[in-house]
Image: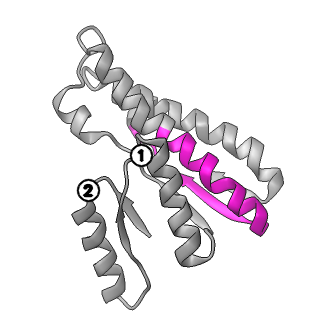
Amino acid sequence: MVADVNADGATDQAKRIVADGNEAIGIAFDLGDPASIEQLVREAVRIFGGVDVLHNNAAATNIASTLDGPILTAEASVWDDTFRINVRGTALMIKAIAPHMIERGSGSIINTSSGAGSSGDLGHAAYGASKAAINAVTLYAATELGKRGVRVTP
C-alpha cells in the first residue's frame, strides 16, 4: 500500500510497483489527521490481512520549502504544522500499526529522518528539529516494541 496526501502520486507509484510484477494499491491519506491514520491502517489490514512493514517517510516539505526559515523568524504555526505532520504523524502511525504487528508476532517499522535532524543550518529550523524528534521517537519505539517482536529502525 502506497499512502500519501498526494493521491495521484500514491496511485502512480502503486502502478509502477504493479508494472514490476508486484501487488500494490495507492491510497490518499493525511498523516496530520489521526482519523485518516486509523482509516489507513484499517484498510491495510482489511485488504492485505495484516501489516508486516511500515515505512514512515513523513516530510512536510510544502511547509519547509515555503514557510520554514531561521529559528528567529519562523512562525509558531510553522512549528505546529511541521511537528503535527512529521513527528506526531510518525508516532501515531506506529501506535496504530504496532498492535497488529504484535498480534502477528513480528513486524518492522522504518522511520526515515534526515541529516537535518543532527546538523544546524541557517534555515528550515522547524523541519530540522522535527527530524531530530523523529530520531528520538524511533529510539523510544524500538525500546518499547523490540521485546514484543517488532523491530523499529531509522
Q: Nearer the viewer, residue 123 or 42?
A: 42
Left or right of residue 107, residue 3 in this image:
left
Report the residue at 56% width, 77% height from top: 48
**Left or right of 148, for residue 24:** left
Residue, far top? 72
* Residue type (three-letter) at the residue carrying disc 2: Asn
Which residue is pictured at 45% across the width and 43% down the height?
A: 113
At horizontal 56% and vertical 40% (from top left) the residue drawn is 91
- Give the x, y percent position of residue 148: 81, 55
Is 77 above or below relative to 32? Answer: above
Mark carried by residue 31: 1
In the structure shown, which secondary structural element does the residue marked by tag 1 occupy? loop
Residue 77 is marked as none
The residue that mark 2 highlights is 6
Question: Which of 16/77 is in front?
Answer: 77
Q: Position of residue 129 (x, y in %)?
A: 42, 26
Q: Is residue 76 visible?
A: yes
Q: How is the image coloured?
A: one colour
Quick check: marks 1 and 2 in contact, CB under 8 Å? Answer: no
Give the x, y percent position of residue 17. 35, 80
* Residue furthest left as drawn: 66
State the residue lying farthest toward the right: 147
Q: Give the percent coordinates (x, y) of residue 153.
A: 61, 51
Instruction: Compute the Cα span from label 1 to label 2.
Output: 11 Å
Would residue 113 be counted in the magenta stretch?
Answer: yes
**Res. 45 image quadrant:** bottom right
Q: Quadrant of the N terminus?
A: bottom left
Instruction: Check if residue 80 falls in the magenta segment.
Output: no
The part of the image, by quadrant, that contains residue 51 is bottom right
Q: Magenta segment, which residues?
A: 89-115
User: In terms of secondary structure, what is the magenta stretch mainly?
Assistant: helix
**Three-letter code, disc 1:** Leu
